[in-house]
Amino acid sequence: MKTEYDRRSAIGFIEPLYKISVALAVAPPCCLKEHKISKWKTNKNYGILMTLLVITGYVLSVIGRVHDCYPYFANATLVVTDALFGFVLTVANVISILIPLSYTRTNFVTFLNAFATVDDFLVRNGKNVEKKYKFLVVQLIFGHVVMLTLFVYDAYVWLTSVGMKQYRNYIFRDIQSYYSSVVIMMIYNLLLSLTCRFRSLNELLDNLCPFDLMDNVNVLCELKVRVTQLQPYRRVQQISQVYEVLITQIIYFNRVFGWQILFITATIVVGLLNTLDILIVYGVFKNNHGSLTFGNDLIILSIFWSVLHFIFGTIVAASCDSATKEAQRTAEICYKLLLSLPAMPEKSQDRALREQLYLLAQLSSQRCPGFSAAGFFRVDYSMLLALFGSVTSYVIVVIQFNK
């Protein structure tokens, strides 16, 4: 029986988010249905233009802060964290724009094609590929409402506290924060897609009955269609091949998004340092400086920004950790199936099945590369705890400094 399969279902559900990413120049223009990058030269020119705009906006905002804002800051730590956050955020966005221009088209197309390859196998074996289109729409609506609300409240606090002269130097930072949020959302949904495919493959393997699984397959022989039987070890061999495709996909993901994850992580950490510094200085020790007055609105705003940075960090770490654990769970399923087989099988099919299960278990436990931030560190919950631990240490130092 022929299975109709639309490649658009492989990764096409992210098309609304992908169009936003292309408009921001953080993704190459690509037909998600055909998995072909179009208008490559035009995209390079557009990316270079957006890079220049980001750098120009950053330079102008820095000049404005030095003249209009930094002289009024309560202490040096606020100046340092504010300047560092603006710099790291700009570098992260520039990297997000330049990476799609620097990596070869083959890398990105190979990454997309792997989704279709895996989905073809899953659909042929009766596993429906999860489509997250509605979930993505909810993400986009909720995310934009939250970001817009935060930007409006940010503008209100600045205008009522210090006026337009100082606030205009931070408008561009809000735009850059939106850039980073789109990149994080793209990373999250691609990792979610990988996790779903690992989970579907594991379910297919877990439902494998070593003793009586026989799948009818039509085979053309001597111009007649006859029914043959697919041995269990053949099925495990096919699953191993698809698993290898998913592992290769993780490698390409690290090549494409590794540097973005590295600088986004740095942005999250420095952003937390900056907002917590503001919260401590103006919320705990003083609420005014010179002719400027900062009320509870600034404290609330700092809490909101801190929570947002924390959520962004958790999203990146949790999505990477979830995909890695689902990939490693394949080994557990293989060992469980191995225990259900005879220790000394007499039939050659059983021996072949044991061998294939053992090879797949080794592949899952030793070959799965995991996700990394450009090779500097692994991205998982342990990374999240380490980073937030360093933030806590800095907060203690700031409190001691301001006493």
Image (cartoon, rainbow, N blue to C red):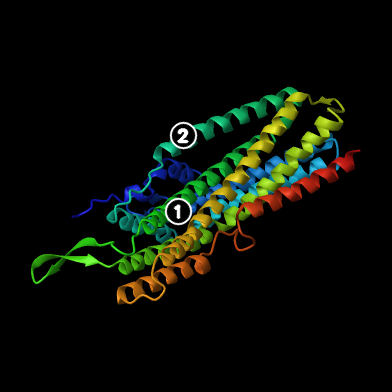
Q: Amino acid at mark 2?
A: Val
> Disc number at residue 138?
2
Of the pair 340 and 82, the residue shown nearer to us: 340
Is residue 330 something that shows in the picture?
yes
Q: Amino acid at mark 1?
A: Leu
Which residue lies at the image location 49% right of the left edge and 37% below the top edge? Answer: 139
Which residue lies at the image location 31% right of the left edge and 66% below the top edge? Answer: 232
Q: Please, is residue 57 above or below residue 209 in the view?
A: above
Quick one: label 2, few (<14), some, or many (20+) residues within 10 Å?
few
Counting from the top left corner in percent of width and height, residue 171 is at 65, 34
> Disc number at residue 194?
1
- Determine the secondary structure under disc 2: helix
Counting from the top left corner in percent of width and height, residue 320 is at 55, 53
In the rendered structure, the answer to whether residue 105 lies left or right of residue 297 reads left
In the rendered image, the quadrant that contains the C terminus is top right
Is residue 102 something that shows in the picture?
no
The image quarter containing residue 383 is bottom right
